[in-house]
Amino acid sequence: MRIGPYTLKNNLVLAPMAGVTDLPFRRLCKEMGAGMAVSEMVASNSLLWGSEKTKRRADHAGESEPRSVQIMGADPQMMAEAARYNADNGAQIIDINMGCPAKKVCNVQAGSALLRDEALVGRILDAVVNAVPEVPVTLKIRTGWDRDNKNGVNIAHIAEAAGIQALAVHGRTRADGYKGDAEYQTIAAIKAAITIPVIANGDITTPEKARQVLEHSGADGVMIGRAAQGRPWIFREIEHYLQTGETLPEPGLEEVRDILLGHLENLYRFYGEYTGVRMARKHISWYSKGQRHGAAFRQAANRVDDAEEQLVMVNQFFAQLMENREIAA
């Protein structure tokens, strides 16, 4: 799959997720097979650009190309300025958020709230594309505002006309939030209506589902979000299945432990110990989901404030799992 001058190694993309797709997680998912990873969104308000949080979100140190940064806002001029700022600070692809259904985003008429105003969508896309002529601009949307107003095809036409170079579509409306099942018929209609790459998103949790969605929608790629939390190896599993039709075995406990420990070390380095330990808690919860005595382990791990103690707890938890496995065998 190609976006502007960048040919991705495959058609698998890590979705931008607030509080999740920081630099350590993006690098890990790329190492485990993602062809591209999109940063968590950066506000278009320039007053926030100097904050530590925004600086971290725009940090790409050691990240493989292409480096994609998502911006969010509802004012065309501010969005154009945000695009220029991020391009000047290392972003090689600018992604525009018109897909987030969160109330705090939609209440300021950004994210998927913008789908209600097609004229404004056009003005924002034109402003951003013209602001960074050397940088490809991509767009993330939903199928529409609600089930009676699925205007994804109209938005896709506007996007292509504005010069957007790839379009990711989540198979739910703004009103759906994350409830119910994603649908891919609208994504198929969007793919049939435009010539730029279309990336399908929503409920893609297994290699089999990835192939099914690609075949049903005709999309050029798939975007994985929540299914990668605590399971970054889903990208290599999907890539292998799409190439061979064979299912890779699940990673063993030793490998899961090593991936998690490496992830934690990178979080501590990136955020510092205090914030890193706290950021690590949700990842520890995701990695341990479904494991024996996982709930008790998560409760204990969430009370730890020290990096060294956190690492010791993780090692002890996996040692116990491996010991129980050997006894059962």
Image: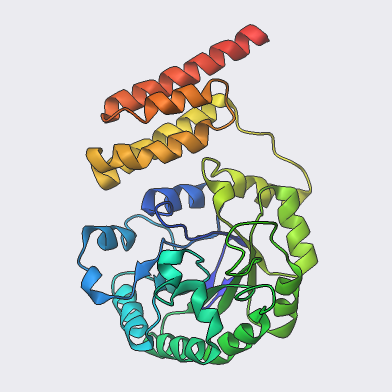
Residue lying at 66% horizontally and 9% vertically, measured from the top left: 328
Q: In this view, does 91 lie to the left or right of 244?
A: left
Residue 99 coordinates in the image, percent (x, y): 53, 70
Q: Is residue 56 left or right of residue 287?
A: left
Question: Does residue 123 sit above or below 44 in this rendering?
Answer: below
Quick one: 289 or 244, which is closer to the camera? 289
User: Can you tell which quarter of the image residue 12 is in?
Assistant: bottom right
Quick one: 266 or 171, which is closer to the camera? 171
Residue pushed farthest top? 327
Residue 221 coordinates in the image, percent (x, y): 65, 65
Residue 34 coordinates in the image, percent (x, y): 55, 54
Q: How is the image coloured?
A: rainbow
Residue 164 visible in the shown view: no
Q: In which quarter of the image is the C terminus?
A: top right
Residue 42 coordinates in the image, percent (x, y): 35, 67
Residue lying at 59% horizontally and 58% vertically, measured from the top left: 178
Question: Does residue 122 sit above or below 259 in this rendering?
Answer: below
The count of marks equals: 0
Q: In which quarter of the image is the N terminus?
A: bottom right
Quick one: 6 or 321, which is closer to the camera? 321
Residue lying at 63% horizontally and 88% vertically, measured from the top left: 157
Residue lying at 70% horizontally and 57% vertically, measured from the top left: 181
Residue 218 visible in the shown view: yes
